[in-house]
Image (cartoon, helix red, strand yellow):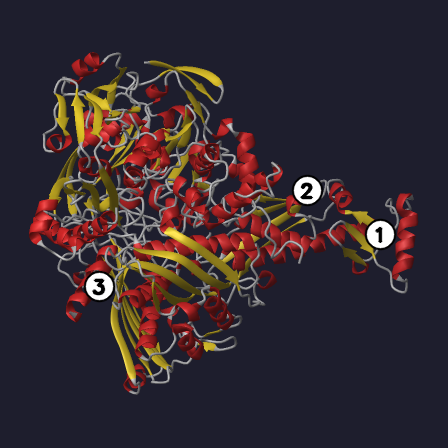
């Protein structure tokens, strides 16, 4: 069947098998940041935005993205670098395999809530597994990013 | 992932129902559970074009479309207020936000899975399913029915004067529950919906009359004792029957303690 | 120091956080044949026939290989990444008629795409003669059922292996008279401790692709920690010369030891070698969980004797280790259970350590961070914690009384001297960090929950004494930037960056001026690989020595250009300058400044020449190589030390337990990169917590593993842990680069005893088996309650 979607701002049309997963579709179209880490929808490595909502691309049929917009880290390079720098400054990116899914979902979190507290951060990102970092360094990086953002926007002296 | 031969975004419920009569066809919910199966699917039927992805609230009821996601349930302010946060609590442990953005109410309720937090929660409320051909059926009846080829269109929750509580115990925070417990405290007593036994949720009732007759000092402990006596639990890799029975008592007691105050 | 002991960003950090395609499956050629494996559903069986006729007819299928394609009496091999001759037995064939665990490989299928390969896999018809399996490792030794009855099973190194007894290894060591020491003790702690075959669960599964290069050689690109060992393993498996194989690694999505065994390589290697076409394999997560190389299940019997005043007199240990269907890392992991736990107790007059490693019909175990020390430390530290409780002595105080100190000889640690040790400071620091005095042993929070604390110590090694080899090649390029070539594998740990930091410190340049080339058997200098916590200490020392040699080369050519004796020049990282005697510093400075733009007969302004000019000069009419290679091995393996304390909140009725705070102090010598060292510690600690609380392994009666996915095998998520806090109490190890030891493995060891002792303090029940699940806690508490009523 033929599907059409906007992938990272570009219109893509392709012929696919009905059971093709969105994960494989985006990788076939050059979005290598999207990773596969399991078969049971548990790891979060494959997180992409489907019409701006973070979803597991391993569990979405490419056909379901027909007529929709899909965003991967390839389409958010500036934001990824800006936020990612804070993770890098902690050394918490480690092997990097969880990074794209984690950063996608973190960016989704910031879109839903500008300044989440620690519990909100943990819960929102609970579906993004990481085996290298113990999560602590990533939390430090997120908090440093939020503090920097707050200061940049002049909210430094306001209440959280 | 098994093979799907065709994908169809249904343009009407009738079309979806017709397609679903073929044995090799399946309705897609969030697809998260279906994806892990091994069977061959002829046509995968997608209901997402039918406007069934919203939660409508009226004075009398909530009408929850089958394509409403678990994340939608989690964030809905109406359900949050009505259930004192219990609905939110029932889904917030499920894997992750991305997962809950896909998993649907229809998929969860149709599936009537043992581990289902969603089934447990809604069973404690005055809930009904609306089937395309079968009409409106009380959830507690639907929960006992075998799988069929009807389409689950929406979940209806009739509002009542009640307070709610949801608890679950897990071996790790985003894992399947070892036991689930949703409790409704109504004007006439308590309803206890206990799931992941590992069997699917079942309902126990304790009316005010029962409580008065029993004449106990500690209602919470009494409720726990009653449920423990009636509940059937089993063992699997996540827990033993004995542990589940123990947990049923603990969770019921805690729920009643909390709700008695209200 | 300018670069060492500094928290610099990893060299690849920005590439990783922006999701660049740098992993194996991102760079594999698009036309690779897809390789998948048909696996045995039986734990022990002989393949009587394989009918692949229908499968071969599937459109797109290139080849299907079965045991009939592999000479069954050919020389066997091991998949374990170890220095040759390997201590692991040679007990594998690429395809064996005898399958020995549920998941063992029966056929290799290669085809154009996943769909046709999946289809073909379903059409292969296999007949098995099902045999009775050995699933209980207690019954393995001398069982009439043999896991490896074959005649061509081989043990190259005497490790006490005997395939006719299902023994993969046996060892006995000791010092002093243990029975005497125990007899004369006021108190004996005598228990058996059980840990399970936990999985590394790195995020990137095993994956490899292979091609044939211009010279007809097999090129292997794999997510591996051990390129050189892999080359040998493939040569052995394929029975082709090593010279025909090249192995290299791209970015790796984690390893933790899993990739110290060649799990995936041999299959695409065989396919590509046979078909001469590129091929690749990507293991599913299910294959990672069921057919890989987890930690060895161990049952450890400890008898510990101590006096009333807390002096530990002797430790007697027997380890029974379950190596599964193949012997990989069986003989080598077991030793650490005793040798990297007992030495912590420096006052002990005697020790004895006996071990058996047995074959069974479950998934073959392998290397996982800690490598046997983790299991042994759980046993020993738990026993010491129990001793503390029985003596009504604070566990910290008890440790302080007994620990090995800097300068001590360690009889149980191969007789080595403890050359650098800040264990005592680690103890003090952690006690402070966790606020032990206000929390020990338990506080009732009043809401059905209690909070309790527990602690544990750990040690490990830094490389394998006189075995592990690390090398480095550094060359100077035009413009004066450096290329550092290593054979160690950065698997996310950041060793590429750390080694560049060491080089930069010696070469007095910035880290950005050093390009690091990763492990490639064709071009890297030899390195055993990234395991045994060897990279910083062994390879790092090679880098340090190499950079010093390069400095010499630079000075030599610089002196030549300045037409002065080599003894008169110094290099400051940017310039080689001639230093004259008898001239004051100011005069020299003035001369230099005056002569700056004046070229004299040397062609250079005054008495100095820039590195960039030296590099340029090296490319014209020059016979001095601006390059050096150094190989390093160490006769010492200085242990890193660590102390950890956990604060655990326990719901006494449901049994749920959560580590709300974990405090740790590490002595890894000088932390070359404190950020990376800290994150390594935090990550290892959480892996240990997972092993203690949530990661379970259960087999059914037929030998099938229940925890075959991330849905069933639960590693900690962000909401399963409170805070983890790590600090450094550094000793200075003279033999290490800039005082550094290692940190890679020690970090996983403290949570097992710390968490389990916290749970004892919370509930009054001690657990001797991991994981400690909510059910175990709740039922123990309920039982105690019933007993007391």
Residue C109 coordinates in the image, percent (x, y)? 28, 32
Which residue in the protein does label 3 denote? C781
Please give the name of the residue rendered at 66% of the width and 57% of the height, measured from the top-left corner.
C548
Identify the disc placed on residue C477.
Answer: 2
The disc numbered 2 marks a residue on which chain?
A: C
Query: From what the image shows, is residue C229 above or below residue B98?
Result: below
Q: Are marks 2 and 3 on the same chain?
A: yes
Does dot 1 land on a helix, a strand or a loop? loop
Which of C114 and A144 lies nearest the eye of the viewer? Answer: A144
Relative image position of residue C565 (x, y in whole percent): 82, 58
Decide which of B136, C366 is in the foreground and name it. B136
| Looking at the image, residue C780 lies above or below residue C614 | below
Instruction: Identify the image quadrant of residue B147.
Output: top left
Residue on which the image places disc 1: C563
Chain-order first, disc 1 or disc 3: 1
Q: For the residues marked 2 and 3, what is the alpha-carbon distance in whole angstroms?
A: 68 Å
Instruction: Work out whether mark 1 precedes mark 2 in sequence or the reverse, and give the earlier one.
Output: 2
Which quadrant is home to the N terminus of chain B? top left
Q: Is residue C401 visible?
A: yes
Q: Of the residues tagged 2 and 3, which is closer to the observer? A: 3
Question: Where C26 falls versus B255 (above or below)?
Answer: above
């Amino acid at each position: 069947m033929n599907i059409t979607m906007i992938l990272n701002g570009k219109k893509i049309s392709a012929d696919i098998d009905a059971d093709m997963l969105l994960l494989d579709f985006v990788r076939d179209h050059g979005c290598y940041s999207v990773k596969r880490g399991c078969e049971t929808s548990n790891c979060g490595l494959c997180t992409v935005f489907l019409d701006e909502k973070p979803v597991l691309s391993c569990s979405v049929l490419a056909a379901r993205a027909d007529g929709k917009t899909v965003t991967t880290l390839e389409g958010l390079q500036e934001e990824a670098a800006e936020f990612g720098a804070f993770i890098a400054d902690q050394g918490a990116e480690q092997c990097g395999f969880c990074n794209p899914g984690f950063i996608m979902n973190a960016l989704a979190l910031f879109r839903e809530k500008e300044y989440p507290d620690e519990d909100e951060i943990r819960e929102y990102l609970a579906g993004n597994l990481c085996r290298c970092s113990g999560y602590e360094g990533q939390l430090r990086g997120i908090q440093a990013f939020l503090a920097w953002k707050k200061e940049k926007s002049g909210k430094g002296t306001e209440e959280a | 992932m098994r093979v799907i031969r065709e994908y169809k975004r249904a343009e009407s419920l009738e079309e979806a129902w017709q397609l679903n009569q073929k044995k090799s066809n399946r309705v897609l919910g969030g697809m998260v559970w279906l994806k892990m199966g091994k069977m061959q699917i002829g046509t995968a039927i997608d209901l997402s074009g039918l406007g069934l992805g919203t939660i409508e609230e009226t004075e009398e009821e909530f009408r929850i479309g089958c394509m409403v996601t678990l994340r939608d349930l989690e964030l809905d302010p109406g359900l949050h207020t009505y259930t004192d946060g219990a609905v939110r609590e029932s889904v917030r442990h499920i894997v992750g936000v991305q997962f809950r953005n896909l998993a649907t109410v229809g998929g969860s309720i149709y599936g009537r899975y043992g581990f289902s937090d969603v089934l447990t929660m809604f069973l404690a409320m005055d809930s009904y399913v609306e089937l395309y051909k079968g009409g409106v059926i009380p959830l507690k009846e639907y929960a006992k029915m075998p799988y069929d080829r009807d389409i689950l269109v929406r979940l209806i929750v009739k509002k009542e004067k009640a307070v709610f509580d949801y608890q679950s115990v897990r071996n790790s925070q985003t894992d399947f529950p070892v036991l689930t417990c949703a409790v409704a405290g109504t004007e006439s007593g308590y309803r206890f919906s206990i799931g992941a036994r590992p069997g699917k949720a079942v309902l126990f009732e304790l009316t005010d009359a029962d409580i008065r007759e029993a004449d106990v000092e500690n209602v919470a402990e009494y409720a726990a004792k009653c449920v423990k006596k009636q509940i059937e639990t089993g063992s699997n890799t996540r827990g033993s029957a004995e542990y589940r029975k123990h947990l049923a008592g603990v969770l019921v007691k805690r729920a009643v303690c909390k709700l008695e105050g209200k | 120091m300018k670069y060492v002991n500094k928290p610099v960003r990893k060299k690849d950090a920005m590439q990783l956080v922006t999701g660049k395609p740098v992993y194996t499956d991102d760079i594999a050629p698009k036309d690779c044949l897809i390789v998948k494996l048909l696996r045995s559903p039986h734990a022990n069986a002989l393949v009587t026939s394989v009918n692949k006729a229908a499968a071969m007819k599937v459109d797109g299928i290139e080849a299907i290989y079965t045991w009939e394609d592999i000479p069954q009496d050919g020389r066997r091999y091991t998949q374990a990444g170890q220095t040759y001759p390997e201590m692991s037995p040679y007990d594998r064939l690429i395809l064996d008629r005898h399958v020995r665990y549920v998941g063992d490989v029966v056929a290799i299928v290669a085809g154009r795409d996943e769909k046709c390969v999946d289809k073909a896999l379903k059409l292969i018809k296999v007949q098995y003669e099902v045999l009775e399996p050995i699933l209980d490792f207690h019954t393995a030794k001398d069982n009439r059922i043999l896991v490896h009855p074959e005649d061509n099973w081989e043990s190259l190194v005497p490790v006490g292996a005997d395939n006719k007894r299902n023994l993969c290894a046996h060892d006995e060591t000791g010092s002093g008279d243990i029975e005497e020491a125990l007899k004369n003790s006021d108190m004996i702690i005598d228990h058996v401790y059980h840990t399970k075959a936990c999985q590394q669960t790195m995020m990137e599964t095993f994956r490899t692709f292979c091609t044939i290069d211009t010279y007809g050689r097999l090129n292997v690109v794999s997510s591996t920690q051990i390129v050189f060992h892999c080359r040998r393993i493939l040569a052995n498996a394929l029975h082709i010369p090593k010279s025909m194989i090249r192995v290299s690694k791209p970015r790796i999505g984690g390893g933790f030891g899993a990739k110290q065994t060649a799990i995936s390589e041999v299959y695409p290697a065989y396919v590509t070698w046979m078909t001469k076409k590129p091929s690749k394999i990507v293991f599913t997560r299910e294959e990672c969980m069921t057919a890989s190389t987890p930690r060895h299940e161990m049952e450890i019997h400890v008898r510990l004797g101590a006096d009333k005043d807390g002096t530990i007199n002797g430790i007697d240990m027997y380890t029974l280790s379950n190596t599964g269907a193949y012997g990989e890392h069986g003989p080598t992991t077991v030793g650490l259970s005793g040798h990297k736990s007992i030495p912590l107790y420096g006052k002990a007059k005697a020790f004895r350590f006996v071990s058996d490693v047995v074959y069974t019909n479950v998934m073959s175990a392998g290397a996982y961070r800690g490598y046997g020390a983790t299991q042994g430390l759980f046993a020993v530290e738990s026993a010491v914690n129990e001793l503390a409780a029985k003596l009504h002595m604070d566990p910290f105080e008890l440790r302080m009384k007994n620990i090995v100190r800097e300068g001590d000889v360690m009889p149980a640690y191969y007789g080595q001297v403890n050359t650098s040790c800040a264990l005592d400071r680690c103890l003090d620091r952690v006690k402070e960090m966790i606020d032990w005095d206000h929390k020990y042993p338990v506080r009732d929070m009043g809401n059905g929950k209690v909070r309790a604390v527990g602690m544990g110590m750990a040690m490990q090694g830094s490389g394998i004494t006189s075995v592990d080899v690390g090398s480095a090649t550094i060359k100077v390029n035009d413009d004066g930037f450096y290329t550092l070539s290593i054979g160690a594998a950065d698997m996310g740990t950041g060793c590429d960056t750390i080694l560049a930091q060491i080089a930069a410190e010696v070469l007095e340049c910035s880290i950005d001026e050093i390009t690091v080339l990763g492990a490639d058997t064709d071009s890297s200098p030899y390195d055993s690989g990234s395991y045994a916590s060897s990279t910083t200490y062994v390879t790092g020392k090679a880098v340090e020595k190499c950079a010093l040699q390069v400095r010499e080369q630079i000075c030599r050519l610089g002196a030549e250009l300045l037409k002065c004796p080599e003894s008169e020049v110094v290099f400051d990282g940017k310039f080689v300058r001639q230093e004259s005697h008898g001239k004051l510093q100011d005069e020299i400075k003035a001369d230099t400044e005056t002569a700056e733009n004046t070229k004299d007969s040397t062609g250079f302004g005054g008495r100095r020449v820039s590195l960039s000019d030296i590099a340029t000069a090296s490319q014209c009419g020059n016979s001095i190589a601006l390059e050096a290679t150094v190989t390093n091995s160490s006769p010492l393996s200085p242990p890193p030390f660590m102390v950890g304390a956990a604060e655990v909140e326990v719901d006494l009725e449901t049994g749920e337990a959560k580590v709300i705070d974990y405090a740790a102090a590490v002595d890894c010598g000088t932390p070359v990169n404190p950020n990376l060292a800290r994150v390594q510690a935090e990550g290892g600690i959480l892996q240990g917590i997972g092993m203690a609380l949530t990661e379970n392994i259960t087999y059914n009666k037929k030998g099938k593993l229940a925890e075959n996915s991330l849905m069933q095998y639960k590693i900690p998520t962000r909401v399963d842990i409170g805070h983890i806090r790590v600090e450094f109490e550094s000793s200075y190890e003279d033999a290490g680069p800039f005082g550094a030891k290692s940190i890679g493995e020690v970090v996983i060891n403290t949570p097992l005893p710390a968490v389990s002792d916290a749970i004892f303090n919370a509930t009054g029940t001690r657990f001797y088996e991991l994981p400690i699940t909510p059910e175990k806690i709740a039922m123990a508490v309920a039982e105690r309650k019933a007993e007391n009523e």
